[in-house]
Protein backbone atom coordinates (compact mmCIF):
# COMPACT_ATOMS: atom_id res chain seq x y z
CA UNK A 1 0.00 0.00 0.00
CA UNK A 2 1.44 3.36 -1.01
CA UNK A 3 1.99 6.23 1.39
CA UNK A 4 -0.60 8.27 -0.53
CA UNK A 5 -3.17 5.52 -0.05
CA UNK A 6 -2.36 5.27 3.67
CA UNK A 7 -2.69 9.04 4.02
CA UNK A 8 -6.04 9.03 2.21
CA UNK A 9 -7.35 6.28 4.51
CA UNK A 10 -6.17 8.18 7.58
CA UNK A 11 -7.83 11.35 6.33
CA UNK A 12 -11.10 9.47 5.74
CA UNK A 13 -10.99 8.03 9.26
CA UNK A 14 -10.34 11.49 10.72
CA UNK A 15 -13.23 13.00 8.74
CA UNK A 16 -15.54 10.19 9.80
CA UNK A 17 -14.56 10.69 13.44
CA UNK A 18 -15.22 14.45 13.22
CA UNK A 19 -18.65 13.87 11.69
CA UNK A 20 -19.65 11.17 14.19
CA UNK A 21 -18.53 13.17 17.24
CA UNK A 22 -20.39 16.29 16.08
CA UNK A 23 -23.60 14.41 15.28
CA UNK A 24 -23.47 12.60 18.64
CA UNK A 25 -23.03 15.92 20.46
CA UNK A 26 -25.96 17.42 18.55
CA UNK A 27 -28.15 14.50 19.61
CA UNK A 28 -27.08 14.95 23.22
CA UNK A 29 -27.98 18.67 23.05
CA UNK A 30 -31.47 17.92 21.72
CA UNK A 31 -32.56 15.90 24.72
CA UNK A 32 -36.12 16.80 25.71
CA UNK A 33 -36.81 18.94 28.74
CA UNK A 34 -35.55 22.19 30.12
CA UNK A 35 -31.89 22.99 29.68
CA UNK A 36 -30.02 22.57 32.95
CA UNK A 37 -27.87 25.41 34.22
CA UNK A 38 -24.74 24.40 36.12
CA UNK A 39 -24.85 27.50 38.34
CA UNK A 40 -28.47 26.82 39.31
CA UNK A 41 -27.58 23.29 40.40
CA UNK A 42 -24.56 24.49 42.35
CA UNK A 43 -26.76 27.05 44.12
CA UNK A 44 -29.31 24.37 45.11
CA UNK A 45 -26.79 22.02 46.72
CA UNK A 46 -26.11 24.03 49.92
CA UNK A 47 -29.83 24.72 50.29
CA UNK A 48 -30.66 21.03 50.08
CA UNK A 49 -27.84 20.14 52.47
CA UNK A 50 -29.19 22.58 55.07
CA UNK A 51 -32.65 21.06 54.63
CA UNK A 52 -31.15 17.60 55.15
CA UNK A 53 -29.38 18.76 58.31
CA UNK A 54 -32.58 20.30 59.70
CA UNK A 55 -35.06 17.55 58.68
CA UNK A 56 -36.34 15.63 61.72
CA UNK A 57 -38.28 13.02 59.69
CA UNK A 58 -35.88 10.21 58.60
CA UNK A 59 -37.99 9.31 55.54
CA UNK A 60 -38.01 12.89 54.28
CA UNK A 61 -34.29 13.19 55.07
CA UNK A 62 -33.46 10.20 52.85
CA UNK A 63 -35.55 11.73 50.03
CA UNK A 64 -33.58 14.94 50.34
CA UNK A 65 -30.32 12.99 50.37
CA UNK A 66 -31.36 11.30 47.14
CA UNK A 67 -32.23 14.66 45.63
CA UNK A 68 -28.75 15.97 46.56
CA UNK A 69 -27.11 12.87 45.07
CA UNK A 70 -29.12 13.31 41.85
CA UNK A 71 -27.99 16.93 41.57
CA UNK A 72 -24.37 15.97 42.19
CA UNK A 73 -24.62 13.31 39.47
CA UNK A 74 -26.08 15.88 37.09
CA UNK A 75 -23.12 18.17 37.79
CA UNK A 76 -20.76 15.37 36.85
CA UNK A 77 -22.68 14.84 33.59
CA UNK A 78 -22.53 18.56 32.81
CA UNK A 79 -18.80 18.50 33.42
CA UNK A 80 -18.48 16.07 30.56
CA UNK A 81 -20.31 18.35 28.14
CA UNK A 82 -18.58 18.42 24.75
CA UNK A 83 -16.97 21.57 23.37
CA UNK A 84 -19.52 22.26 20.65
CA UNK A 85 -17.48 25.03 19.05
CA UNK A 86 -14.48 22.75 18.60
CA UNK A 87 -16.62 19.85 17.35
CA UNK A 88 -18.41 22.11 14.88
CA UNK A 89 -15.10 23.50 13.60
CA UNK A 90 -13.83 19.96 12.99
CA UNK A 91 -17.12 19.03 11.31
CA UNK A 92 -16.89 22.09 9.06
CA UNK A 93 -13.38 21.10 7.98
CA UNK A 94 -14.46 17.57 7.09
CA UNK A 95 -18.08 17.85 5.96
CA UNK A 96 -17.79 18.91 2.31
CA UNK A 97 -15.35 16.20 1.29
CA UNK A 98 -17.09 13.63 3.50
CA UNK A 99 -20.47 14.54 1.96
CA UNK A 100 -19.17 14.19 -1.55
CA UNK A 101 -17.47 10.88 -0.83
CA UNK A 102 -20.54 9.43 0.94
CA UNK A 103 -23.22 11.07 -1.26
CA UNK A 104 -24.80 12.96 1.66
CA UNK A 105 -26.98 15.91 0.68
CA UNK A 106 -27.83 19.16 2.43
CA UNK A 107 -31.37 17.95 3.31
CA UNK A 108 -29.94 14.79 4.91
CA UNK A 109 -27.60 16.85 7.11
CA UNK A 110 -30.45 19.18 8.08
CA UNK A 111 -32.72 16.27 8.98
CA UNK A 112 -29.91 14.87 11.13
CA UNK A 113 -29.95 18.14 13.08
CA UNK A 114 -26.94 19.95 11.62
CA UNK A 115 -27.59 23.71 11.70
CA UNK A 116 -27.74 25.52 8.37
CA UNK A 117 -24.99 27.86 9.57
CA UNK A 118 -22.57 24.93 10.01
CA UNK A 119 -23.39 23.60 6.55
CA UNK A 120 -22.87 27.03 5.06
CA UNK A 121 -19.47 27.33 6.76
CA UNK A 122 -18.60 23.88 5.41
CA UNK A 123 -19.51 24.96 1.87
CA UNK A 124 -22.37 22.48 1.51
CA UNK A 125 -24.95 24.03 -0.79
CA UNK A 126 -28.71 23.70 -0.57
CA UNK A 127 -29.33 21.30 -3.41
CA UNK A 128 -31.61 18.43 -4.08
CA UNK A 129 -30.56 15.10 -5.39
CA UNK A 130 -32.27 14.34 -8.68
CA UNK A 131 -33.18 10.84 -9.63
CA UNK A 132 -31.43 10.00 -12.90
CA UNK A 133 -33.04 6.62 -13.48
Image: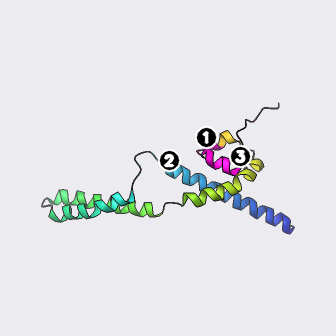
Q: Earlier in the sequence, mark 2 or mark 3?
A: 2
Report which residue position mark 1 lands on: 111
Q: Earlier in the sequence, mark 1 or mark 2?
A: 2
Q: Residues within 10 Å of mark 1 (few under 14, many from 20)?
A: few
Of all residues, the one furthest to the left in this rendering is 56
Q: Earlier in the sequence, mark 1 or mark 3?
A: 1
Please report the residue visible at 66 percent of the width from the left and 41 percent of the height from the top: 108
Please report the residue visible at 59 percent of the width from the left and 46 percent of the height from the top: 115
Q: CA distance from mark 1 to mark 2?
A: 13 Å
Q: Quadrant of the N terminus?
A: bottom right
Q: CA distance from mark 1 to mark 3?
A: 14 Å
Q: Residues within 10 Å of mark 2 (few under 14, many from 20)?
A: few
Report which residue position mark 3 lands on: 124
Magenta residues, start to end: 109-130
Report which residue position mark 2 lands on: 30
Q: Position of residue 79 (x, y in %)?
A: 45, 64
Q: Position of residue 82 (x, y in %)?
A: 53, 60
Q: Secondary structure at mark 3?
A: loop
Please report the residue visible at 41 percent of the width from the left and 45 percent of the height from the top: 33
Q: Position of residue 34 (x, y in %)?
A: 40, 47
Question: Is residue 130 among what the camera can see?
Answer: yes
Amino acid sequence: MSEEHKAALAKGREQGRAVREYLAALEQERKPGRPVDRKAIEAKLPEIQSRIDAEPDPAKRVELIQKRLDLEERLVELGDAPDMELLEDRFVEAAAEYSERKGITYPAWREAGVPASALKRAGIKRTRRTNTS
